[in-house]
Image (tube, grey):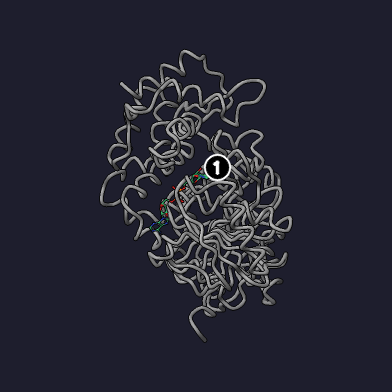
């Protein structure tokens, strides 16, 4: 049996995460049996889990559980393991050879689902919380796939991707779920090959690329396509005229409604191709294949597409969630250092939004040699942060606004300098510093300034850019509603607020300070 077929797909996660339902649905979708190790333990012991716990104690239960898990893994099928199995070291060790899928669940949701039930560890709220915190890093350490929560629907949707991931051991997968769609975000060497793998879901009858020639010339990994339409990177190319040219080419190539588009390039090509895909014949699927750091950590995810007007950035656009996002970190090998640095600004932004472990990691590695080798993990974690924000608010009516941290002033700097002086990420670097000043977080502003400077990002505004023009351009930000322009402010890493009014003179001072 080939290694991929011996690899079990193992669902894990805290009590109440829905892992058994997800496993059952995935097994049904793939036409195999699902083994539930708790049910298997009960069958062997001839008693319910709660009784084994009460009679023999947790230690004996874990011993029995480890035995059953190891036997179940040997089948190479689909397995749902008990939430506490990861506490046993030999189980964690055994899971390394398999595809482990973490079904995430928030602590309060898990408690609501489990309280009053038969689970022995869901009797006491405090103990429940303690276990939740203690197990979290154990799940993270073993999981190659992270689903937002389990249940039948997600098990069915994710099943074909999980099946092909068995044969791609270096690829991790997160899952996008919004009101309008669900999609995988695959990160790792070999991610682009998933689409061509037998059994992988097809994006469309035929796949056509809209691709940045610079990325293709650099030999970035990309899926196989019928034909390629060139679309240049660089903000100057993100125009309605470029969109019209791409749409004309799609029509000339005879692309039909049941075909799909692969957007291969940085954020510019991703936004442009995504926009074209969303309007071509009223919409065809788009597969995002991000080849810059900005695109891998941010723009390829979340479904915002669009182009600029001379008046302001992203003034024309749509929401069009991707069919899949396939991010291969090897694409970043050819990225010029300045582009990589620009992407780091979005990494710092995302880490500030996430707080916790991601923020600690990013502040530790910014500008060090460790940053490069940590990139795949950082990309994966940034992707998860963005996915979880978008899951709550696909259409930017509330919480999604936090992703705009640093972007109000950042976009205004881009517009005021004719989209030529700064890369997007460089402008965001300056925008982040302005946002931290407006947040009144002086110490954090200083630290973030150091993190950005450590990778060569600008922390001071070019004297050629007129601060008055920047302030004026913030007035055209499309986030401005009739109620005025709300700002995204930082209370602390992981604690971000949006829609905050800021007095005009404070905004002026924060922008002028960038020139100091
Ligand atoms: N849709 C969203 O949610 C979202 C989020 C963040 C940013 N964005 C948008 O993303 C854009 C910026 O994206 P970007 O920074 O990726 O810019 P970009 O697409 O212009 O790429 C930067 C440069 O890198 C080149 N390039 C791309 N891949 C390469 C590779 N692998 N090797 C060598 N060169 C390569 C491009 O040709 C270009 O010159 C902005 O327009 C911004 O508004 C959108």
Residue topped by disc 1: 127
Note whether residue 46 is visible. Answer: no
Front residue of 250 and 2: 250
Q: Quadrant of residue 395?
A: top right
Corner quadrant of residue 189: bottom left
- Residue 133: x percent and y percent? 50, 44
Q: Look at 51% across and 61% down and name the residue there.
A: 230
Q: Considering depth in this image, is 149 or 450 the residue closer to the camera?
A: 450
Task: Reply above or below: 198 against 222.
Answer: below
Q: Answer above or below: position of 358 versus 102.
A: above
Please tell me which residue lies in front, 395 or 114: 395
Which percent across, then down, holds residue 456?
A: 29, 41
x, y (%) of residue 414? Answer: 45, 35
Residue at horizontal 64%, vertical 72%?
Answer: 206
Q: Which residue: 39% across, 24% down?
A: 466
Tell me the crowding category of disc 1: few under 14, some 14 to 19, or many 20 or more residues within 10 angstroms, Cα based. few
The answer, for residue 346, to whether it is visible in the render is: yes
SS assignment at label 1: helix
Residue 218: horizontal and vertical position, in percent?
A: 38, 64
**Which residue is the extreme one toward the left?**
369
Q: In which quarter of the image is the C terminus?
A: top left
Quarter of the image for residue 183 reads bottom right
Between 206 and 245, the one nearer to me in the picture? 245
Q: Image point 35% across, 20% down: which residue?
A: 513
């Amino acid at each position: 049996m080939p290694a991929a077929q011996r690899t079990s797909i193992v669902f894990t996660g805290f009590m109440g995460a829905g892992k058994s339902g997800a496993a059952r649905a995935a097994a049904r979708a793939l036409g195999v049996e699902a083994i539930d190790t708790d049910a298997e333990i009960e069958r062997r012991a001839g008693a319910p889990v709660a009784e084994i716990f009460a009679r023999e104690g947790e230690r004996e239960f874990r011993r029995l559980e480890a035995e059953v898990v190891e036997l179940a893994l040997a089948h190479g099928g689909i397995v749902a393991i008990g939430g506490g199995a990861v506490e046993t070291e030999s189980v964690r060790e055994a899971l390394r050879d398999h595809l482990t899928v973490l079904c995430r669940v928030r602590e309060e949701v898990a408690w609501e689902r489990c309280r009053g039930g038969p689970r022995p560890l869901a009797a006491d709220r405090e103990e429940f919380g303690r276990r939740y915190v203690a197990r979290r890093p154990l799940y993270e350490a073993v999981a190659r796939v992270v689903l937002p929560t389990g249940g039948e629907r997600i098990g069915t949707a994710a099943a074909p991707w999980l099946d092909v991931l068995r044969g791609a051991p270096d690829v991790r997968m997160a899952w996008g779920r919004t009101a309008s769609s669900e999609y995988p975000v695959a990160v790792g060497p070999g991610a682009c090959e998933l689409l061509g793998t037998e059994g992988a879901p097809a994006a469309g009858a035929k796949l056509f690329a809209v691709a940045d020639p610079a990325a293709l010339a650099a030999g970035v990994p990309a899926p196989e396509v019928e034909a390629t339409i060139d679309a240049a990177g660089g903000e100057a190319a993100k125009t309605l005229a470029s969109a019209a040219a791409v749409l004309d080419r799609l029509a000339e190539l005879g692309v039909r409604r049941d075909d799909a588009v692969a957007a291969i390039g940085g954020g510019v090509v991703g936004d442009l191709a995504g926009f074209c895909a969303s309007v071509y014949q009223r919409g065809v699927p788009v597969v995002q294949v991000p080849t810059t750091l900005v695109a891998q950590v941010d723009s390829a995810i979340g479904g915002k597409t669009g182009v600029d007007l001379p008046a302001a950035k992203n003034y024309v656009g749509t929401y069009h969630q991707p069919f899949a996002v396939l991010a291969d970190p090897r694409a970043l090998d050819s990225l010029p250092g300045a582009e990589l640095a620009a992407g780091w600004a979005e990494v710092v932004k995302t880490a500030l939004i996430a707080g916790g472990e991601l923020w600690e990691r990013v502040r530790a590695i910014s500008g060090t040699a460790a940053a490069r080798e940590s990139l795949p993990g950082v990309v994966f974690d940034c992707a998860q942060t963005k996915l979880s924000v978008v899951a709550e608010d696909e259409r930017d009516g509330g919480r999604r606004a936090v992703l705009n941290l640093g972007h109000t002033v950042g976009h205004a700097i881009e517009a005021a300098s004719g989209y030529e002086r700064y890369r997007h990420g460089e402008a965001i670097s300056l925008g982040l510093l302005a946002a931290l000043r407006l947040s009144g977080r002086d110490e954090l502003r200083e630290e973030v300034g150091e993190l950005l400077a450590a990778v060569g990002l600008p922390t001071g505004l070019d004297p050629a850019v007129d601060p008055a023009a920047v302030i004026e351009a913030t007035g055209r930000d499309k986030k401005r509603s009739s109620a005025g322009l709300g700002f995204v402010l930082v209370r602390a890493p992981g604690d971000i607020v949006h829609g905050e009014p800021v007095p005009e003179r404070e905004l002026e001072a924060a922008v002028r300070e960038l020139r100091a």
